[in-house]
Amino acid sequence: MMDTITNSIHRIIACIISIARLSRPLPWGGVGGGLLGGVGVGLLLACTSRLPYQHDEGMVFGTFYSITYQHDHNLQPQVEEALQQVDREFSMFNEQSTVAAINRGEQPQRSDMFREVYDLAQQVTADTDGAFDITVAPLVNAWGFGFKNEQMPTPEQVDSLLKIRSQLDFSAIAKGYGCDVVARTLAAQGIENYMVEIGGEVVTHGSNPQGNPWRIGVTKPTDDSLQTDDSGLQAVLAVTDMAMATSGNYRNFYYQGGRKYAHTIDPRTGYPVQHELLSATVFAPTCAQADAYATAFMVLGMEGAKAVLQRHPEMKGYFIYTDYRGDMAVWHSEGLEINN
């Protein structure tokens, strides 16, 4: 750490010295201001741009992460530690996590991190009239088991599960929060240019290695889950200094009796949603917020999601849906930079 800071300081000092030389008094009087001052600023920017971009990949929360950032040294150990902190709080697969202990009926100490995410989840639940709910896991599991075995839960089972609200599941917000935690870790190192992606949830800041805004693809809602090339992208969006999360049904459904059942369960009714919205991408100041609202929007549907966005000028949406003809269509908030 000290070597990294020392190298960075040396580079900055060298740049300052170069700029100072440009500002020395000129033979005909005055100093090297104006154009030369502009050159000095350009030199300082050039010093920064010479920093290399690092790229880290790995597994966390049962999915992949990919992180690109501009820095002298690779910081993957710090990134991994930040992600493990989130895992120790919210992982459903880590028996030592706080949420696992709570679901076993224990009373573990709640950390500031746990309270931060729990409070945000409760805020989104209230703001969406219960469309987002971190206690929906028993219903999701029941329907998931039914999908696999082609036997749907009975109305009596659904009614019974609706009364069970003791099991917590942060999977619809933890990946987004993990992105936020990594972004904070990078920012604390003075890093201004980075992109953090965990399982499709993204936080960006500054510029990409080409000096341009970061551009993130939105997957086209097709039933072909094996399509991985660019032809599977619905659009490419400019995402700079903001967070982005996507939720969708198009790869999670089951046909029974000629009817298509989505895997998104409405926590208020206990049944899979039935509406036209195929994919909801949300842009927000934090990825945890984007993650939670994207999930809620898939429950609310188009009109409900639009109504929430009207109350939140800090958020934007990009929705893919089926129109009245059954064709795929797109609606998005004003101000999004989109390349179709």
Image: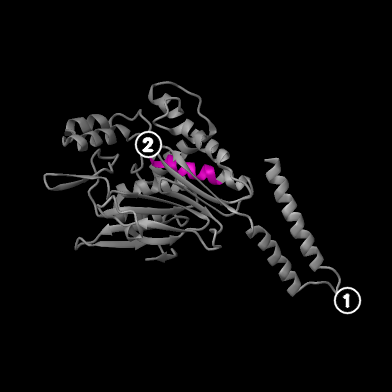
Label 1 Cα neighbours within 10 Å, binned few <14 / some 14-19 / many ≥20: few
Q: Which residue is mark 1?
A: 27
Q: Nearer the viewer, residue 321 or 266?
A: 321
Relative to 134, residue 179 above or below: below
Residue bearing the label numbered 2: 134
Query: Dots 2 and 1: beta carbons under 8 Å?
Result: no
Q: Quadrant of the N terminus?
A: top right
Q: Residue at x 28, y 30 (%)?
A: 163
Q: Quadrant of the C terminus?
A: bottom left
Secondary structure character of the magenta stretch overall = helix
Q: Which residues are magenta?
A: 172-183
In the depicted structure, whether residue 280 falls above or below residue 3: below
Q: Residues within 10 Å of mark 2 (few under 14, many from 20)?
A: many
Position in image of residue 264 (x %, y %) = 28, 44
Q: Could you tell me residue 165's position as x and y percent?
A: 33, 30
Tell me if 10 is positioned left or right of 119 in this view. Answer: right
Is residue 241 one of those drawn in magenta?
Answer: no
Is residue 177 located in the magenta-colored stretch of the structure? Answer: yes
Q: Which kind of residue does numbered mark 1 sit on?
A: Pro
In-image side of 76 versus 336 (left or right): right
Compared with 176, 22 (above or below) is: below
In the rendered structure, which amino acid carries the disc numbered 2?
A: Ile
Q: Earlier in the sequence, mark 2 or mark 1?
A: 1
